[in-house]
Image (cartoon, rainbow, N blue to C red):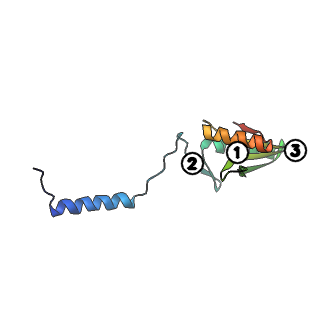
Amino acid sequence: MRPRWTEADVRRAGLQIQQQIATPLQKQPRHGNVKVAWQGMKFDSQRELEKFKEFELERLGGKIRGVMRQISIPLTGHKRRIRIDFLIVENDGRMRFVDAKGHPEREWLLKRDLIHQQFGLLIETV
């Protein structure tokens, strides 16, 4: 025979459920990356921030014309998009697409290949 719940047991269980509902779950990153902020900008990883700093130093040193962050490109025939970390504008006007990836996932690689097929754009991974 199971013991019956007392009124205090029910109250305690109700409080525990309310606490669980009120506490938002933090989404854990898949690859252990930690989002960081620097000079008012947010980056998805420390690696992305370091690459941005490198590109900014190149820009200030005159090696490249400019750097843009978080370029979003729609995939033709899909509702999906691919977000590329950096668009680098070379001094001669050529553009390079660069993504800071520690562990490229299969889905991202497929999107990268679709972009290459559809638009002829090559995306470098650093």
Badge 3 crowding class, 10 Å Cα cut-off, few under 14, some 14 to 19, many 20 or more, is: few
Work out whether residue 31 can be spotted.
Answer: yes
Residue closest to the far left:
1
Q: Count how many numbered circles sit on residues in the image.
A: 3
Residue 100 visible from this viewpoint:
no
Distance, label 3 to label 2, CA atoms, is 31 Å
Q: Which residue is outermost to the right?
A: 92
Please tell me which residue is depicted at 64% across the width and 41% down the height of the picture. 108
Spatial distance from mark 1 to mark 2, Cα to Cα?
14 Å
Instruction: Tell me the element at label 3.
Output: loop
- Mark with earlier residue (3, 1): 1
Disc 1: CA contacts within 10 A as few (<14), some (14-19) or many (>=20): some
Label placed on residue 52? 1
Camera-nearest residue between 7 and 80:
80
Q: Amino acid at mark 2?
A: Lys
Query: What amino acid is found at the position of numbered circle 1 in the picture?
Result: Phe
**Real-space Cα separation, disc 3 to disc 1, in angstroms:** 17 Å
Residue 12 is situated, as x and y percent measured from the top left of the image, at: 23, 60
Query: 41 left or right of 18?
Result: right
Instruction: Indicate which disc residue 81 carries.
Output: none
Identify the residue at image location x=62%, y=41%.
Answer: 107
Residue at point 12%, 51% (across, down) = 2
- Identified by mark 3, the residue type is Asn
Name the residue carrying label 3. 91
Q: Which residue is mark 2?
A: 35
Determine whether, in the image, residue 52 is placed left or right of residue 2: right
The image shows residue 101 at horizontal and vertical percentages of 64, 38
Is 74 above or below relative to 121?
below
Q: Secondary structure at mark 1?
A: helix
Q: Quadrant of the C terminus?
A: top right
